[in-house]
Amino acid sequence: MRNESERRAAARRRAEHRGRDAERRVAGWYAAQGFVVLAQRLRTAAGELDLVVADRTTLVFVEVKARNALRSAIESVAPRQRRRLVAAAAIVLAGQPDWGRAETRFDVVLLVGDDVHAIRDAFRADDP
């Protein structure tokens, strides 16, 4: 029988795999809509951005959540995490000025089973 730390490590590996799979699916979903994937799992000093995609006019920072229920997916993007995403986006824009577009937004994409629920412009950088 596994000890508690082995069970936690196995659960983290499963969650990591599930997250990577969800991010790949969402990247394909954006690509099918004409967006170019600029980065996946982009790490910054403020935290990680799941996806950065763009079309000619819009740069989108995407947070991907895969859950068993829609409500738990929505609730998983709390104000603290939104602030972290905004800070990470600012770091990316400072380091990649050529990624700038006329419009920048933050999307949250929720995967529940095979269903994709995209919340476009889910929050703004200046939201409390």
Image (cartoon, helix red, strand yellow):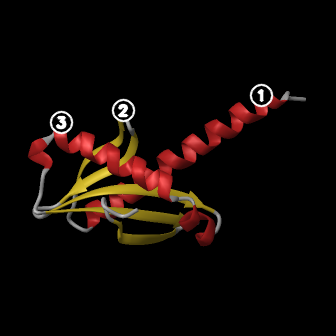
Q: Viewer-nearest of labels 3 and 1? A: 3
**SS at mark 3?**
helix
Q: CA distance from mark 1 to mark 2?
A: 28 Å
Residue 112 visible somewhere in the drawing: no
Residue 95 numbered tag: 3
Three-letter amino acid code at disc 2?
Answer: Ala
Specify the quadrant that holds the C terminus.
bottom left
Q: CA distance from mark 2 to mark 3?
A: 12 Å
Quarter residue 26 falls in = bottom left
Q: Earlier in the sequence, mark 2 or mark 3?
A: 2
User: Which residue, given by chain and number where applicable, does mark 1 sit on?
Assistant: 5
Q: Is residue 48 left or right of residue 110?
A: left
Give the image location of residue 73, x and y in percent: 57, 64
Instruction: Answer above or below: position of 45 versus 28.
Output: above
Q: Is residue 80 visible?
A: yes
C-alpha distance separating marks 3 and 1 = 38 Å
Judging from the image, what secondary structure is the residue with disc 1 in?
A: helix
Q: Residues within 10 Å of mark 3 (few under 14, many from 20)?
A: few
Instruction: Look at the numbered discs 3 and 1 and tell me whether their residues touch, using CB distance below 8 Å.
Output: no
Looking at the image, is 86 positioned above or below residue 116?
above
Residue 97 relative to residue 117: left or right:
left
Instruction: Give amino acid for label 1.
Output: Ser
Q: Quick check: 47 above or below 3?
A: below
Which secondary structure, mark 2? loop
